[in-house]
Image (cartoon, grey):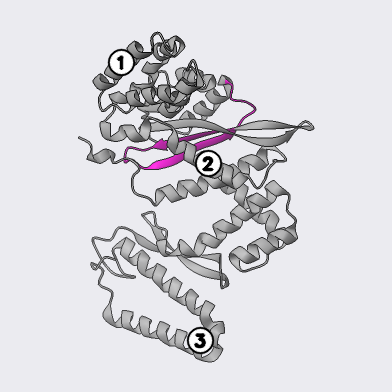
Amino acid sequence: MRNAINLPTATSSETNNNRIDEIYNLIMSQGTDAILPAFRILMNEAMKTERSEALNAAPYERNDERLGYANGFKPKTIATSLGKITLDIPQARGMSFFPQSLEKGMRSERSLKLAIAEMYVNGVSTRKVSDITEQLCGFDISSTQVSNLAKLLDEDLERFRNRELGCFKYIQFDAIYEKMRHSGSVSSLPILICIGIDPLGKREVLGVSASLSEAEIHWRKFMLSLQKRGLRGIELITSDDHPGIRQAVKSVFPSVAWQRCQFHMAQNAQSYAPKKSMRLEIGQAVRNIFNSPTIEDANNFIDKARVKYRDSAPEFIKWLDDNIEEGLVVYRFPKEHRIKIRTSNCLERVNKEIRRRTKVAGLFPNESSCLRLVTAVLQEIHETWATEPPYIKILDVI
């Protein structure tokens, strides 16, 4: 809270006393029934105070250092554990403002949207949805409200998928598969996902798309859509060795360096062991290369592996010679960044959370229902990342 704002003492004192008297009278006359109205008064006052601090000026104050102007209020109904409540959201002109004190009050609304998304996935009845929302949010919901909120949900998710992007230093691509009914049978639906790290080191979910396959044409279409939305400034792309991704990256981002995921490479190397007992040993040999502090040390480990396995595992050596350079691109970048950009593990953790949330669905009725739930989960992850410290401390690197 800034102390620079000097609220008019008499007016401020009178207002505070009036609010206290109002809350006191409510409690005296209504008892516990006054909790929700009292909460509304407190929230409205807190948001007005927050707006004044953001503007660097109290209401009606003449101030050359103000950053914007108050612009009235907008009513918004939110769901709380106490019930629904309509608040007066302060608006501002000349600057972007949204009261952070409202975030906790909107958690029930986000929970409701996700509940509706899962309802569409599972074909749950309106009665069951009502039971879910009553547990999550403390109120019932009608079939008409379900339809209206579902429409709002889809509009919100569509805006998220198509929002304007910007500069991102590092991006990662991957796909997960979900089961879907298609033409009377069950098929695997690839969900293409991209995440990025911006110039400040913060993570964002950049895009998601449901596709008929992981063929190059679908990856290329997905990457072009990211470009069209303003994605630029990319210095490194990390992904596994899927042919569709590789070909699309070469076509859409020909001048951007591509790092093959080191984790997947170490796993892949084990399949070239001549016998089962050597798999862990060969996997460790590749990890030793990737864990080297410098490119010179990495090349030394490569030379040692060639000598050690030339006769005992010739197929592994051939694989090493053909592929290892694709795993060493990350050495062109700052050492402090490598641990976060040398694999697609960050995106793998995202995929794990998606699978945890979609597991209850089992089988999706169609492509749109799958995309709806996956996007809702990704939007939630994206919002969580926005509140966290930078994933990579880019500005600290000289």
| x 48%, y 76%: residue | 39
Q: Main secondary structure of the magenta part?
A: strand
Residue 108 lies in what quarter of the image? Answer: bottom right
| x 48%, y 16%: residue | 272
Q: Quadrant of the C terminus?
A: top left
The reply to whether residue 231 is visible in this rendering is: no
The three-letter code of the residue at mark 2 reads Lys
Pointers 3 and 2 in contact (C-beta within 8 Å): no
The three-letter code of the residue at mark 3 reads Leu
Q: Is residue 89 left or right of residue 111?
A: left
Q: CA distance from mark 3 to mark 2?
A: 49 Å
Q: Quadrant of the N terminus?
A: bottom left
* Residue designated by label 2: 352
Most foreground residue, 231 or 83:
83
Q: Where's residue 95, x and y in %?
A: 36, 54
Does the magenta segment cover residue 288? no
User: Magenta segment, which residues?
Assistant: 191-215
At numbered mark 2, what does the secondary structure look like: helix, strand or loop?
A: helix
* Residue designated by label 3: 26
Looking at this view, name the residue that lies furthest to the right: 184
Q: Nearer the viewer, mark 3 or mark 2?
A: 2
* Residue designated by label 1: 304
Residue 397 lies in what quarter of the image? Answer: top left
Q: Nearer the viewer, mark 1 or mark 2?
A: 1
Q: Earlier in the sequence, mark 3 or mark 2?
A: 3
Crowd around label 2: few <14 · some 14–19 · many ≥20 (10 Å): few
At numbered mark 1, what does the secondary structure look like: helix, strand or loop?
A: helix
